[in-house]
Image (spheres, rainbow, N blue to C red):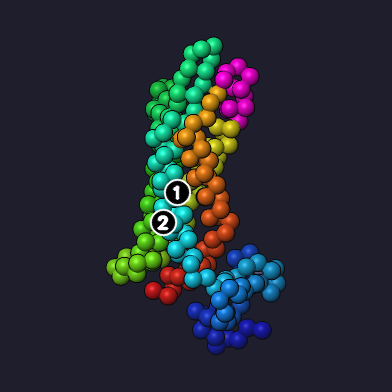
Amino acid sequence: MLQQNLPVDDMIACHSCDLLHQRTALVEGEKAWCSRCGSLLYRTSNNTIEMALALTIASLLLFLFAQLLPFLSINVEGNKTTIYLVSTIDTLSQLDNLLLGIAGALFLVVIPLGVLLLDLLLLGALYSNTRPLTQFARQLLLLIGRLAPWNMLEIFLLGVLVTIVKLASIAEISLHQGFWAFVALVMINLFVSTTLEPEELWQAIDKH
Ligand SMILES: [Zn+2]
C-alpha cells in the first residue's frame, strides 16, 4: 500500500493504468513491471542514450538519402518519369493547390526533420553532458512529444505502397535508393517507438 509520506520523486505511475508504485533500485539488466497490468515501468540500461543517439544519426542520414536520391520511376508505354521525394511537394503545389503543397512540405520535410534535429540536440546534450543544454532537456522532450504525432512518414509510406499496387497494372514501376532509404527510415522510427520507453529518457534527464 502507498504511504502518504513518500517523496514524489520516488514514485512512478504506470503508463498504461496509472497505478502508482514506489521506485526501487534495480541491478543491471533488471526490469520493473506494473503489479496491476504487467506493463514495463522502468529498466536499468546504461546504453539507452547511446542507442537512441546512434539511431537518430542513422535516421538523419536516411532522411537525406530518401529526399535527395531518386525515389521511384514510372514507365508508361516507354514514357519514363523518375520521381524524387522532394519533387512530390512541388507537384502537390502545381496541382493548383498551394495549401496541399504547404501541408506536404510540413508533414514530409519540416516536422520529420525538425523532430530528428530536436532528438539529436537532446540526445547529444545528454550523451556529452553539455551543461547549458541539459537544463532545457525537459522542455525539449515535451516539445518532441507534442510534434511526434504530426510525423506522418509511416502514413505517407502506406499511401505510396497503395499507389504502387494500383499503378502496377498500367505502368512499370521501379523502386530506387531513395525509396529503400525511406523504408529503412520508417522501420527505425517504428523500432524506436516500440522499444524506447519515454520513462528511460525521463530517468536519464533526471540524472543530469
Ligand atoms: Zn499498470
Q: Secondary structure at mark 2?
A: helix
Residue 132 visible to an observer of this rendering: yes
- From the top left corner, tell me how far across and down residue 16 is, in percent: 63, 64
What residue would you read off at disc 1? 59
Q: Residue at x 55, y 23 (%)?
A: 173
Identity, as a three-letter code, of the amino acid under mark 1: Ser
Q: Residues within 10 Å of mark 2 (few under 14, many from 20)?
A: some
- From the top left corner, tell me how far across and down residue 166 is, in percent: 62, 24
Work out how far the residue at label 2 is from the one at label 1, CA to CA, in angstroms. 10 Å
Q: Residue at x 40, y 28 (%)?
A: 87
Q: Quadrant of the N terminus?
A: bottom right
Where residue 68 sits, quadrant-wise, is top left
**109 is higher (above) or lower (below) than 206:** above
Q: Secondary structure at mark 1?
A: helix
Q: Residue at x 58, y 37 (%)?
A: 158
Magenta residues (range): 162-172
Residue 92 visible to an observer of this rendering: no
- The quadrant of the picture showing ligand 1 is bottom right
Q: Are marks 2 and 1 in contact (CB under 8 Å)?
A: yes
Identity, as a three-letter code, of the amino acid under mark 2: Asp
| The furthest residue to the top | 77
Sequence order check, earlier mark of 2 and 1: 1
Disc 2 CB within 8 Å of nearest ligand 1 atom: no
**54 is higher (above) or lower (below) than 14:** above
What residue would you read off at disc 2? 119
